Image (cartoon, helix red, strand yellow):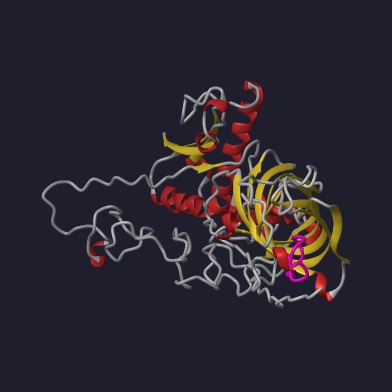
Amino acid sequence: MKLSLAIVALAMAIPAVTYAQDSTAVSNGEYPNTFSSGSANVSPFTNQSKRFNDWSISAGAGVPLMQSADLTSIKNGNGKNLFGYSAYVSIDKAITHAFGLKLQYDRGETRQGWFNTKDAAPDAKAVGARTQYDAISLLGDINFSNLLRRVDNHSPYRWALHGYAGIGTIAYRAYQKDIKGQTLATEVKPFKLGSMFMQAGAGLKYKINNRIDLEGRLMYVVTGDDEFDGGGDKYSAINRREEQVSDNFFNATLGISLKLGKHESHLMWHDPLQEIYYKLDVLANKNQDIEVCKKGDADNDGVCDDWDRQLDTPAGARVDGAGVALDTDLDGVIDLYDKCVTVPGPVENNGCPTTTTGPVVETETKLEGIEFDLNSDRILPSNTPILNNAVNYINSSTGSYSVIGATDTRGTDAYNQKLSERRANNVKNYLIKNGVQSGKINAVGKGEKDLKYPECEPATKCPEWKNRANRRVYFEAK
């Protein structure tokens, strides 16, 4: 057998998925905030304290179709399509949110030629073939949906586009049948240089639940062998492609993945920011801080210095994703110091216009509310800039305020009432710890009786973003 195989070098860039958008200083039970000066007790996050699963097993079955060969599966000779069968099983390891590795075993049979080898040859010129194969390969797995997904996009999603590529070893037996009968045309053993092959393709995954994914996959297999189809150089009568050096086929499969581990979510479906929150949970009771930003966060605005465009953001200022303090009206006075946030004005007049044709109406609500995770009263690190802004506003005001907690409609009335009270009290305690006089605020729980979106009764009638908006704490002037 003449073997011709081009050595294929695969270069895969492993995406480094390191995200940090929130202040992460946690010490002595206090919440992280922009006034924190950092920590003297920093501990790197280890694999042992992770809160996601990164192993899974996958299996599937499908149909291979010989496409580039002397004998093909699609309308070859008699105008009919010949369908084989295939199956695979793999052990999968997620390295990051966007990249993983698969050790995969494939087994199947392709059918090609003028007729199905299960039938008799229709005439003396007709040739049919089938190839039984076994293959082991190492595949790189790129999760394009996570790779291209915005890091601050918290919306739930169940579909993900994956790309695969890798190399391995393939063993096969190619049988040829004509009017005289069936013969073994070619046999190749595994784990030899001549048995190397490669495959690449794409898959669309659907997350059924936290344990099971469903995936449709289309792979293109390059065998590197001109005799894989049962034809080739030895058989000049059916060597229709003399320049052919590799018989290749498509393999369309439908499979499932079972995610292994004790945690609720898998790394490939994991919200990158969730892991930061989980790290804070794990370490909050250990009187430790966690090292998330490699170069630190000098101005403590929640944006790592690695990509912070403004390294001296004033404490309490809200920032965009690049760490630049917000200036809503673009007048050169950041919102923290702007007395007229939505109306441009000179710096010397605190951002307010010096002459007006009428009263300046301030349209921005300075006391913003915050939202909570399901069944949780924990203040998320991403919400601390909002609360720090509330500290400044309440301290500069002469009035007093109610801190009102609310829930969505999941759970009983009694449970939701207590949960809303805990949320309100947590926010109240946070404000007092950061300088608000206790006499200026009080906490009120309204349970599920104060829905921002009343139509979410029951919760299943609404998308998750509306239910999340109902799980909130907001402020009211007394």
Residue shown at 63% from the left, 40% from the top: 377
Q: Position of residue 106 (x, y in %)?
A: 80, 55
Q: Is residue 134 above or below residue 166?
A: above
Q: Is residue 355 magenta?
A: no
The quadrant holding residue 16 is bottom right
The residue nearer to you, when weighing 242 against 255, is: 242
Q: Where residue 61 sits: x, y (%)?
A: 75, 45
Whether residue 443 sits left or right of residue 119 in the image: it is left
Depth check: 18 or 120 in front?
120
Quarter residue 231 falls in: bottom right
In this rendering, would 170 be left or right of 321?
Answer: right
Magenta: main secondary structure equals loop
Whether residue 281 appears in this view of the structure is no
**Residue depicted at 58% across the width and 51% down the height:** 433
Instruction: Tell which residue pokes out farthest to the front in this image.
Output: 124
User: Can the viewer see residue 137?
Assistant: yes
Q: Which residues are magenta?
A: 220-235
Point out residue 8 in the picture as x, y percentages from the top left corner. Answer: 69, 75
Q: Is residue 222 magenta?
A: yes
Residue 73 percent coordinates (x, y): 67, 52
Query: Of all residues shown, which one is farthest toward the left?
Result: 357
Total marks placed:
0
**Nearer the observer, 177 or 377:** 177
Classify the position of the C terminus by image quarter: top left
The one of 331 and 196 positioned closer to us in this rendering: 196
Residue 391 as seen in the image, left or right of residue 164: left
Reply above or below: 56 against 319: above
